[in-house]
Image (tube, rainbow, N blue to C red):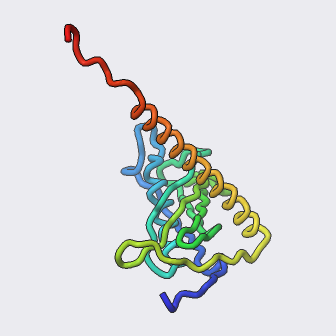
Amino acid sequence: MSGTPSSRPTSATRLSLSHITAQNETNLLGTVHGGVIMTLVDSVAGVVAARHSGGPAVTASMDEMTFLVPVRVGDVVHFSGQVNWTGRSSMEVGVRITADRWDSVGPQVHVASAYLVFVAVDAEGKPREVPQVVPETHEERRRLREAEIRRSHRLAKRAAIIASRNEAAAEVNTAPAAYEGAGD
């Protein structure tokens, strides 16, 4: 894309979304299904990634997401997303989830945080280059450093899994043939 800048500040594509939870989104305990929250997280992160990259982007992974407190029917849930890190064609988007309790006036509660990796794709679905994110504040620089740590952990985990699978395949290929029947 010739019209895509080589870099873009974090603030340029930040996004916030608020959602009032409804009865049809709950489980038997009256709390909102985690999958509902995860769907909204993926939607917010997808818009941030598409805005930052200047076109389509697909979810490649979601890091662990721990729910700190339940979300209840009627709570107003807020999703705030931004690009934390960029590679050649991939980017990490962080989403912070908070909630206002419907039945009280008080501070928002932190519900969860999630980190997703998106890959920008062209019309054929092939990876395409993304603008480099430019952190502008101390907080954004901290997020960039932490995103680099998460990336190194993802790459190390992937390498360990591939090595384990290669080792298992080698064991199968070098094992003696199984004895197939009695009386042969």
The number of discs equals 0
Closest to the observer, 65 or 74:
65
| Residue 41 pos. (x, y %) | 50, 60
Q: Is residue 86 above or below residue 173?
A: below
The answer to whether residue 137 is left or right of residue 90 is right
Question: In which image quadrant can residue 107 be found?
Answer: bottom right
Is residue 99 among what the camera can see?
no
Residue lying farthest to the left in this orientation: 183
Q: Say which residue appears at 58% left-offset and 87% top-offset.
A: 5
Q: Residue at x 36, y 78 (%)?
A: 123
Q: Quadrant of residue 70?
A: top right
Residue 148 appears in the picture as rendered: yes
Depth order, front residue of 3/100: 3
In the picture, measured across the screen, residue 95 lies left or right of residue 122, that is: right
- Residue 89 location in percent, x, y? 53, 72
Nearer to the camera, 15 or 127? 127
Q: Eyeballing the image, is 144 above or below 167?
A: below
Lateral position of residue 137 relative to residue 15, left or right: right
Locate the C terminus and report the quarter of the image it occupies: top left
In the image, residue 146 lies at what x, y percent? 71, 59
Residue with the most extreme bottom position: 3
Q: Residue at x 50, y 91 (%)?
A: 2
Q: Residue at x 79, y 70 (%)?
A: 138
Q: Residue 49, relative to residue 150: is it above or below?
A: below
Q: Is residue 171 above or below residue 73?
A: above
Residue lying furthest right: 138
Q: 129 and 109: which one is in front?
A: 129
